[in-house]
Image (cartoon, rainbow, N blue to C red):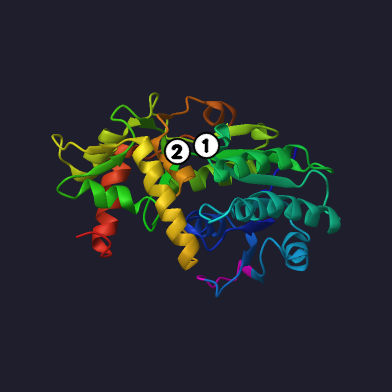
Amino acid sequence: MSVAPPGSRIALTGATGFVGGHLLNPLIDKGYRINALTRRDPPLQNDNVDWIYGDLGDPTALRTLVEGVDGVIHLAGLIKARRKQAFYNANVRGTWMLLDALRDAGQPTDTRFIHISSFAACEPGLSHYAASKAEAEETVRKAHPQPDWTILRAPGIYGPGDEETLFFFQSALSRIPILPGRSGNRTSLIHVHDFCRAIVTALQEPGLSGLTVDVHDGAPKGYLLDDVLRYISDDADKRALHIPGFVLQSLGALNLLAAQIIRRTPSLTPGKARELAHPDWVSTDQTLIEKSSWTPWIKAERGLPETRDWYQLHGYLK
């Protein structure tokens, strides 16, 4: 078992995304030196960050990214696409190309490797995305030579700047809120700041080596989607219109067809509809708390209203 202590050099994919953008500063504050992969102009200039231009399909860039590092955080992934192959290329093939780059760069076999996954990997039959996340996890577990890996599975991650969960905030503040699935559907949640702390913990502590761990805020039964709506709106009497799964899937099929015609990436597909309408995305896994020093700091009752206030301050919500 290995660790990547503060002051060491690490490689980071997904640095320009929602979670990656929040993760950079905690890593810098801890003294890490970071090789960060990017396909566009970097959002942050810092002496501790070396930006490597390329993507998960570029072997040369990946080898430069991982050369001489003590740890890797593989955060990049595709969550929306028109076709199954796109999910496979980004989430599965991209993962094994990163692992191959570690081998080709002559990195020690005990290099710390933190792979960021999703609760969706528990239900691979729901969507092409879910299947790709499950296969990417297996790619890490079966890698040869095998790094010292930990897989962190995330539920719904929310916090300042996230555009994927913005729909729920917009819906909660509308006159007639709309929620996917049945009224009894439940989900676990995690604030992005707590999730970033979990990543740093997994990088530094050996107790999570070789484990697949669910990260959530500790709510034992998760949250009813109706409660999520009420936390955001600060209205205990607010009631939502629930859209049944089969209706969502029909809308997703139409949306996917339109996206294929106009060649745009759809937000709602039949697979995404099945994910949204799934009745139970709750985890009771306590491994992270039991095997490390990490504990969640931000519960939904506090984090959701604070995130709403951030959206309002920055003009995302009226």
In this rendering, the answer to whether 300 lies above or below 222 is below
Question: Could you say which is closer to the camera, residue 125 or residue 287?
Answer: 125
Name the one closer to the observer, 268 or 75. 268
Residue 14 versus residue 224 in the image, above or below: below
> Could you tell me which secondary element the residue under label 1 belongs to?
loop
Residue designated by label 1: 126
Task: Residue type at mark 1: give it.
Answer: Leu
Quadrant containing the C terminus is bottom left
Report if the CB atoms under discs 1 and 2 are less than 8 Å apart: yes
Which residue is painted at 64% across and 69% down in the image?
50
Question: Is the residue 249 above or below the residue 14 in the image?
Answer: above
The local crowd at label 2, few if under 14, some if 14 to 19, many if 20 or more residues have their Cα within 10 Å, is many
- The kind of residue on which mark 2 rests is Arg
Identify the element where label 2 is drawn.
helix
Please give the range of residues in magenta: 43-50
- Would residue 45 be counted in the magenta stretch? yes
Give yes or no for residue 71 being in the magenta stretch: no
Residue 314: x and y in percent read 28, 64
Q: Is any part of residue 264 visible from this angle?
A: no
Q: How many marks?
A: 2
For image coordinates 67% across by 44% down, the residue present is 136
For label 2, the residue is 274
Q: Main secondary structure of the magenta part?
A: loop
